[in-house]
Amino acid sequence: MRGLLALLTATTCLATAMVASATTIYPLDRATILSGSPFDMKVEFDGVIAEGDVTVKINGKPAKDVLGGEIAFIEKEADADASAIRFKGVTIAEAGSYEIVAKAGDETKTVTWDVYGTAETPKAKNVIFLVGDGLSVAHRTAARIMSRGMTEGKANARLAMDDLDRMAFIGTSSTEAIATDSANTMSAYMTGHKTAVNAIGVYADRTKDSMDDPKVETMAEALRRQTNKAIGIVTTSELQDATPAAVASHTRKRGDKAEINQMMFDVKPDVILGGGSAYFLPQATPGSKRKDDKDFVKMYQDAGYTLATNKEELEKATGTNTGKILGLFHTGNMDSTLDREFLKKGTVGKFPNQPGLDEMTKVAIDQLSKNQDGFFLMVEGANIDKMSHPLDWDRAVMDTIEFDKAIGVAMEFAKTNPDTMIVVTGDHTHGVSLIGTVDDEKEGTDMREKVGTYAAAGFPNYTDENGDGYPDKIDVSRRLFLSANNGPDHYETFRPKLDGPFVPAIQNEQKQYIANEQYKDVPGAVLVQGNIPRDGDTGVHAVDDVVLQSTGPGSEGFKGYLEQSDVYRVLADAFALGTKQAK
Ligand SMILES: [Zn+2]
């Protein structure tokens, strides 16, 4: 009898648990929330429920008493034959553990949130947050060897990033999968909340509308709410691309670039430098990607920004003292360092005078540091990722060297401004490794036999006669050999792509990606069989941890393993964003 009773109870519990799992509460279970930071809460029920049958309690009290804000009950949501409750722009002022229980009839869903406070007073005046998009360990090692050289197994000199004293491993997985993209990863850094692939500044709810998802506060919004600090965004990608977008915008779909451009304008970062002018121009202007007549260049100029469209104008803009600079150097993504500075390939013919990431970083710091209250600057080396996708390792590594130069600029500033925290990290990794060298001087024509592994790898023979940190040329006779562990079918040519970025695969009539025949006749090229689905045209992101490094006040919070969303907590603590500051 007792046994039967136990069995019955167990079955009942199981049934309840299964039903309950159909209800979803955003922010998700184990969310960490900055005290006083506005967010949207949403409860998605499994079926249509009468308003009177629903209760949502937080630590035993009705949710609306705890949260305040606007509350709406939706009996039947768009795209779902089910009810939901939305709480818009609510806040929790007091730090602590919060248990949220949503009940609809017999259904119960419970989640717990950790609302955290921060230091009473700021630890750092400035934060410079540098993201190498896709930055993996192989990129760093290759950049060090290519830029600084190596003798008898020891680096001849160190990269700037090698001297940052704190370090942590960062887990980059998204809320829906172990794998990830630049939207949800940067969003975790810039909001303290993990979310789904392609989402920025929101939890990904079940409705199709990409602009209606439950929002969380971004770094830029928190700074505007709590401080008078200046904000800067510097990138070599389109300014609407996921990484820069995540500093200041909210959408379920990173492709909402026109909307992202508007959201960035609403926040008005003081210095904005990068590509993506296509979304600033009214539709009638050639090159515009807008579907309306809004002229964002004019809107920014009317708001007091000095416009720069090339290197020279950017230099001049630094002296103008308006306090605000808008730099637009490309309609799309800016060219890679190798193309821009050396080979003049890619789209450099059309945009001949693009500044480098290090130059943009210098201008941004000079400008932002005029603000007495300090600043937050985000710098993204975007082409590390954009060139790793097509397995173009020379371009990815050259961009890593340029990224390191930008880190050097930040470290130089911190020397005389020790109240500055510097964070250097990737947003996610790529499946790439440095395994040895390719030596043209080995006998024969079979390029594969020229790959040096183990002792046969020796050391590459790049030179840097002019001491600019870049190799004088990349097609030296013994060069680094990097290899991807994933990708589409493609030809491995064992050579730098001097004619422009590598296009490993092209689409056939069945819409599958096959090896690009263009490289078939490169002497010694080897057909590499792909190992990812055939609708993929490039290598994909890896799930491997990212290495984060940091220095300066507040950086002691970076150690061991951290979830990507925990990084925001360290930044918020450094700026005391949980405490109301005198504005
Ligand atoms: Zn990527």
Image: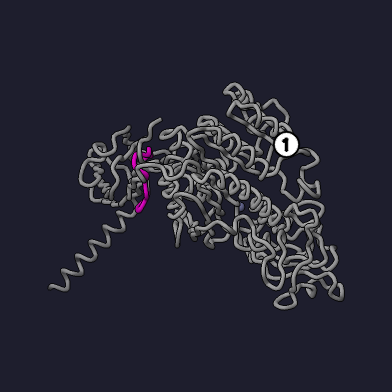
Q: Amino acid at mark 1?
A: Lys
With 183 as the anchor, is 515 left or right in this view? Answer: right
The residue positioned 71% from the left and 40% from the top of the image is 355
Q: Residue furthest top?
A: 302
Residue labelled with disc 1: 311
Badge 1 marks a residue whose secondary structure is helix
Residue 298, compared with residue 384, is above or below; it is above
With 524 as the anchor, is 282 left or right in this view? Answer: left
The residue positioned 44% from the left and 51% from the top of the image is 565
Where residue 390 sits in the image (x, y, percent)?
A: 69, 56
Any part of residue 506 in sight: no
Q: Residue furthest left?
A: 1
The residue positioned 85% from the left and 72% from the top of the image is 441
Where residue 258 sits in the image (x, y, percent)?
A: 58, 34
Any part of residue 422 in sight: yes
Residue 264, compared with residue 549, is above or below; it is above
Give the magenta-colored segment's residue range: 28-40
Residue 66, compared with residue 451, is above or below; it is above
State the quadrant of the C terminus.
top left
Count of numbered marks: 1
State the quadrant of the N terminus.
bottom left
Where residue 269 sits in the image (x, y, percent)?
A: 54, 33
Q: Is residue 33 magenta?
A: yes
Q: Residues within 10 Å of mark 1 (few under 14, many from 20)?
A: some
- Closest to the observer, 1 or 180: 180
Image quadrant in which you'd find residue 528: bottom right
Q: Is residue 162 magenta?
A: no
Image quadrant in which you'd find residue 294: top right
Q: Residue furthest bottom?
A: 455
The residue positioned 34% from the left and 44% from the top of the image is 43
With 498 as the anchor, is 268 left or right in this view? Answer: left
- Closest to the observer, 330 or 403: 403
